[in-house]
Amino acid sequence: STMNKINIGNAPAYTSPNSMTLICTEKPDGSTNLATLAFWAFASTNPGKIMFSLNKGAYSLELLAEKKEVVLAIPGVELTDALIGCGTCSGRDTDKAAKVGLTMQEVEVPCKLLIHATVAQTMDADDHVVHLCDVKGVYGDENVDAVFGWKGYAEFAAAQQK
């Protein structure tokens, strides 16, 4: 085997599958903004902390700066089309929940995992902003098949059990 130098932008293809996520934030009118999120991880389990990174152009960044509350949703395969739809437009000028035909309650139903958290710290990461969050609650459904990004997020599908 020979190691080849690659661009960091191509590295996620080497770690596939990667768990896909919807990040849910509250808009000023009280409605829910949904955004597709790939860059997230557990940061601590005692106490519970998660971290995620948002592109600097993301509307969710503005919403989180205002109200530091977030729900990270690991959706079931039923929400694959919603993940794609939420990742291809901005919530600044689109009601994504309406566009993809979801209410917040419907997001919660076919999910593998929901993590309710509040932003504790942010850090500039050049074209992204990293958020370190305190976990307030975690809800899971082991019967749901989560959606994963394959080939560096070129395809979305469930993971086969090995």
Image (cartoon, grey):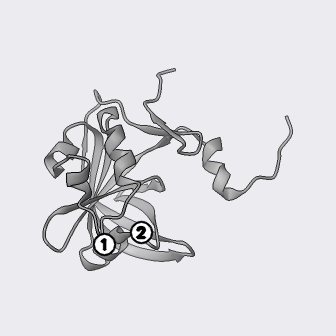
Provide the residue designation for mark 2. 131
Q: Are marks 1 and 2 in contact (CB under 8 Å)?
A: yes
Q: Nearer the viewer, residue 11 or 89?
A: 89
The residue located at (30%, 72%) in the rendering is 64
The residue located at (26%, 56%) in the rendering is 96
Q: Nearer the viewer, residue 62 or 39?
A: 62
Residue 92 in the image: state x and y as whole percent.
Answer: 30, 70
Left or right of 118? Residue 131 is right
Residue 131 image-quadrant placement: bottom left
Residue 80 versus residue 138 in the image, above or below: above
Provide the residue designation for mark 1. 64
Q: Nearer the viewer, residue 101 or 26?
A: 101
Query: Is residue 137 visible to the viewer in this orientation of the structure?
Result: no
Residue 27 versus residue 43 in the image, above or below: below
Which amino acid type is shown beneath numbered disc 1? Leu
Residue 28 image-quadrant placement: bottom left
Label 1: how many Cα within 10 Å (few below 14, some 14–19, many 20+): some
Q: How many marks?
A: 2
The residue located at (45%, 55%) in the rendering is 40
Farthest right residue? 2
| Between discs 1 and 2, the one toward the N terminus | 1
